[in-house]
Amino acid sequence: MAGGWHLAQYNIARLKAPLDDPLLADFVANIDPINALGDRSPGFVWRHQTEEGNSTAVRPRPDKMIIINFTVWESVEALYDFAFKSGHLDVFRRRREWFEHLSYPFAVLWWIPSGHIPTVEEAEERLRHLTEHGPTPHAFTFKQRFPAPDAAPQLAVEAEA
């Protein structure tokens, strides 16, 4: 964990068909197992969910084919390990079967104070910021990361030692 900070992760996807369509049957069948895997992964803190136990019913945009995934982690590394070094990767590799390609940013990362539970509105604002300004400490990506707010001074101190 980066001091008193956690990493928020938000992404959207545009479904190729409604969730009850046979095209999405494998995706829907994997939602609960992948959420359970994430919940017990090292560094996992929180995930957005409704009473159904996931976020598939949440539609924050006028386009009702857009669904969300929203989690909080202790570090970028913990999220990265879950996303790309666990069983999640097998499902992630199949995303083109279920989701349309988006020509704009669909995932965003940002630092939050430990204990803060971010809102979907906050996440949408961060994704908008990333789309409008590119990666910044306010909203960034796996490819262009920024340290937690209190990590940069610590790194400078370690470099001087």
Image: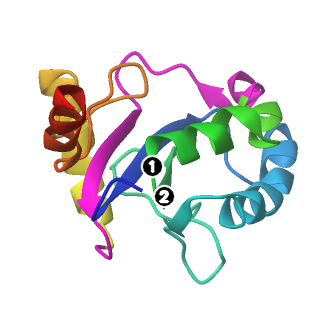
In the image, residue 37 sits, relative to residue 159, either above or below, namely below
**How far across and how far down the image is residue 26, in percent?**
87, 44
For image coordinates 56% across by 47% down, the residue present is 78
For image coordinates 42% across by 48% down, the residue present is 9
Looking at the rendered image, the disc whose residue lies closer to the viewer, 1 or 2, is 1
Q: Tell me where the magenta segment starts and ends, as one range.
A: 93-116
Quadrant in which the C terminus appears: top left
Quadrant in which the N terminus appears: bottom left
In the image, which disc is placed on residue 75? 1
Asked if residue 94 lies in the magenta stretch, the reply is yes
What secondary structure is found at the residue carrying circle 2? strand
- Say whether residue 90 is left or right of residue 41: right
Q: Residues within 10 Å of mark 2 (few under 14, many from 20)?
A: many
Q: Are marks 1 and 2 in contact (CB under 8 Å)?
A: no
Tell me the kind of residue under disc 1. Ser
What secondary structure is found at the residue carrying circle 1? loop
**How far across and how far down the image is residue 134, in percent?**
19, 21
The alpha-carbon separation of the residues under discs 1 and 2 comes to: 12 Å
Give the total number of marks visible in the rendering: 2
In the image, residue 61 sits, relative to residue 35, either above or below, namely above
**How far across and how far down the image is residue 108, in percent?**
35, 38
The residue indicated by pointer 2 is: 71
